[in-house]
Image (spheres, rainbow, N blue to C red):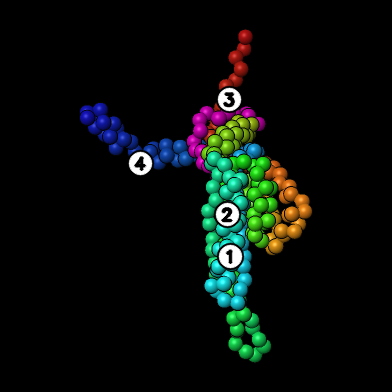
């Protein structure tokens, strides 16, 4: 307690002008800020496919019933190909009226459209083309999305983060060396952009069963980009002169 009291008294005894000069000198400490960016590629180990069944009928119950029958056939065929770690679930469902807009008249309902989208997740990437083919052959008429992803994104993000941090430090040290100085300590580090971009493949929509039956669907997974950015601020100090032998 006595030590802290003595320190406080000494601070109070320092003239205001001297204290403000010390604070100003601290604020004027030379520093350098550098940003490092890293982009690594990783092999995907998981795929998601959104497969749709779209049906139309004069009334809503018929559209829904026809959709449910086709979807049941698609589900049955898809599950035959799914293995351990794979899953299938409903991603979305909609049932809405179709309108005709006569010139000068009121909109008229001409029928109903039912849409059911299944999301298939598989870790067996060699089965992706087969899943698309059997789905279309069983009654699906829309492939809305195909994306390749990583099951463990965190490990890839950490790898990119380490590389971005090292690059930020290397750049800061190069700038300091060019000025005849060196980095004496790290003042601040912040993470900027970080992203794992799934590889999404554009797929045609609509009824394609005849084309699918004629030739299997070729699918190449490719690679996924993992990006990270780090900004580092280091304090600059004088570089020690080499000692003479």
Instruction: Determine whether label 3 and label 2 are within 8 Å by CB.
Output: no
How far is disc 3 from disc 1 in space, using C-alphas? Answer: 75 Å
Q: Nearer the viewer, mark 4 or mark 2?
A: 2
Instruction: Determine whether label 4 and label 2 are within 8 Å by CB.
Output: no
Q: Quadrant of residue 44?
A: top right
* Dot 1 or dot 4, earlier in sequence: 4
Residue 16 badge: 4
| In the rendered image, the vertical position of residue 195 relative to residue 141, given as above or below | above
Q: Which residue is mark 3?
A: 239
Q: Nearer the viewer, residue 148 or 25?
A: 148
Residue beneath the point at 57% across and 37% down: 156
Residue 75 badge: 2
Instruction: Determine whether label 1 and label 4 are within 8 Å by CB.
Output: no
- In the image, the segment drawn in magenta is 177-198
* Dot 3 or dot 2, earlier in sequence: 2
Mark 4 residue element: helix
What secondary structure characterizes most of the magenta part?
A: strand
| In the rendered image, the vertical position of residue 129 relative to residue 208, given as above or below | above
Residue beneath the point at 25% across and 28% down: 3
Question: Residue 60: x percent and y percent?
Answer: 55, 74
Q: Nearer the viewer, mark 3 or mark 1?
A: 1
Mark 3 residue element: loop
Q: Which residue is mark 1?
A: 67
Mark 2 residue element: helix
Asked whether residue 188 is drawn in magenta, I would say yes
* Dot 3 or dot 4, earlier in sequence: 4
How far is disc 4 from disc 2 in space, using C-alphas? Answer: 79 Å
């Amino acid at each position: 307690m006595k030590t802290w009291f003595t320190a406080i008294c000494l601070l109070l005894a320092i003239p205001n002008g001297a204290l403000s000069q010390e604070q100003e000198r601290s604020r004027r400490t030379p520093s350098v800020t550098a940003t490092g960016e890293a982009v690594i590629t990783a092999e995907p180990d998981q795929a998601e496919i959104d497969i749709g069944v779209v049906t139309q009928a004069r009334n809503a119950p018929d559209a829904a019933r026809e959709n449910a029958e086709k979807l049941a056939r698609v589900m049955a065929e898809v599950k035959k190909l799914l293995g351990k770690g794979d899953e299938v679930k409903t991603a979305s469902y909609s049932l809405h009226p179709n309108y005709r807009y006569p010139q000068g008249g009121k909109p008229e309902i001409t029928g109903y459209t039912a849409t059911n989208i299944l999301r298939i997740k598989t870790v067996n990437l060699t089965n992706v083309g087969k899943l698309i083919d059997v789905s279309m052959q069983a009654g699906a008429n829309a492939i809305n999305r195909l994306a390749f992803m990583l099951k463990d994104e965190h490990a890839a993000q950490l790898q990119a983060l380490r590389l971005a941090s090292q690059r930020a430090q290397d750049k800061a040290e190069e700038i300091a060396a060019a000025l005849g100085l060196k980095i004496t300590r790290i003042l601040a580090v912040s993470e900027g952009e970080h992203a794992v971009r799934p590889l999404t493949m554009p797929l045609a929509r609509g009824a394609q069963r005849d084309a699918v039956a004629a030739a299997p669907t070729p699918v190449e997974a490719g690679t996924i980009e993992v990006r990270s950015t780090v900004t580092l601020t280091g304090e600059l100090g004088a570089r020690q002169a080499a000692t003479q032998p």
